[in-house]
Image (cartoon, helix red, strand yellow):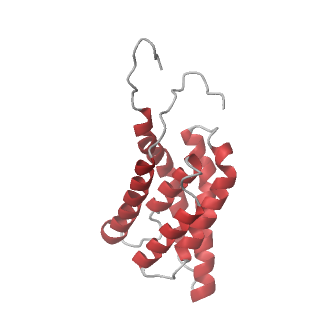
């Protein structure tokens, strides 16, 4: 891939960092569910943002298996339908894997616009499964959750790419 002028070459990401951020994303989602706003329908799903970021940028390391396991853990934490988040996360990661080469060509703000339909799809899968299993139509505030997740995308992208921007040990023989 030809890099745009002025963009820095990124260092490779460490696998430990990828999995640590996924665990931290799960813990942040648990903390947000328990302390901050409870299970508000408009609240962003922090784990899905981190999961989508790594699925787009590290497709070979984070894929549908990680999404399924993360979804089951989130289902157990919330005590709802087992497999609800797992199905939504797998659908989210499947579409992200199909689009990951295209998404990486956009800037971070343009990516936020591009990932909004992915987040909306994941929430519509959750809504449809809840409607079919429980018969409840859910809350209309759920429509704000993909918007909040898309607005958080640039912040999460900047935070997760920061360790890759570390300065290598430059010398006169290695100017990069």
Q: Position of residue 8 (x, y in %)?
A: 51, 26
Is residue 143 visible in this depiction of the protein?
Answer: no
Quarter containing the N terminus: top right
Residue at position x 30%, y 68% in the image: 35
Is the residue 136 above or below the residue 43 in the image?
below
In front of the other: 118 or 17: 17
Q: Position of residue 128 (x, y in %)?
A: 63, 77
The quadrant in which residue 116 appears is bottom right
Is the residue 4 above or below the residue 120 in the image?
above
Is the residue 141 above or below the residue 79 in the image?
above
In front of the other: 42 or 96: 96
The quadrant in which residue 169 appears is top left
Q: Position of residue 18 (x, y in %)?
A: 45, 51
All told, the count of numbered labels is 0
Residue pushed farthest front?
A: 173
Is the residue 101 above or below the residue 128 in the image?
above
Residue at position x 47%, y 66% in the image: 42
Is residue 88 visible in this depiction of the protein?
Answer: yes
Instruction: Name the side, left or right, on which 32 lies relative to 148.
Output: left
Residue pushed farthest top?
A: 172
Residue at position x 46%, y 17% in the image: 174
């Amino acid at each position: 891939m030809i890099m745009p002028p002025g963009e820095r070459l990124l260092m490779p990401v460490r696998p430990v960092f990828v999995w640590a951020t996924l665990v931290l994303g799960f813990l942040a989602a648990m903390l947000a569910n328990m302390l901050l706003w409870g299970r508000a329908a408009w609240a962003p799903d922090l784990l899905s943002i981190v999961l989508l970021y790594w699925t787009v940028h590290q497709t070979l390391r984070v894929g549908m298996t990680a999404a399924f396991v993360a979804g089951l853990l989130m289902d157990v934490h919330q005590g709802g339908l087992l497999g609800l988040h797992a199905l939504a996360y797998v659908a989210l990661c499947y579409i992200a894997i199909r689009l990951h080469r295209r998404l990486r060509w956009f800037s971070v703000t343009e990516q936020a616009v591009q990932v909004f339909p992915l987040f909306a799809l994941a929430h519509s899968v959750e809504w449809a499964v809840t409607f079919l299993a429980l018969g409840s139509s859910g809350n209309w505030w759920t429509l704000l959750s993909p918007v909040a997740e898309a607005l958080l995308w640039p912040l999460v992208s900047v935070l997760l790419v920061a360790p890759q921007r570390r300065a290598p040990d430059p010398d006169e023989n290695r100017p990069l």
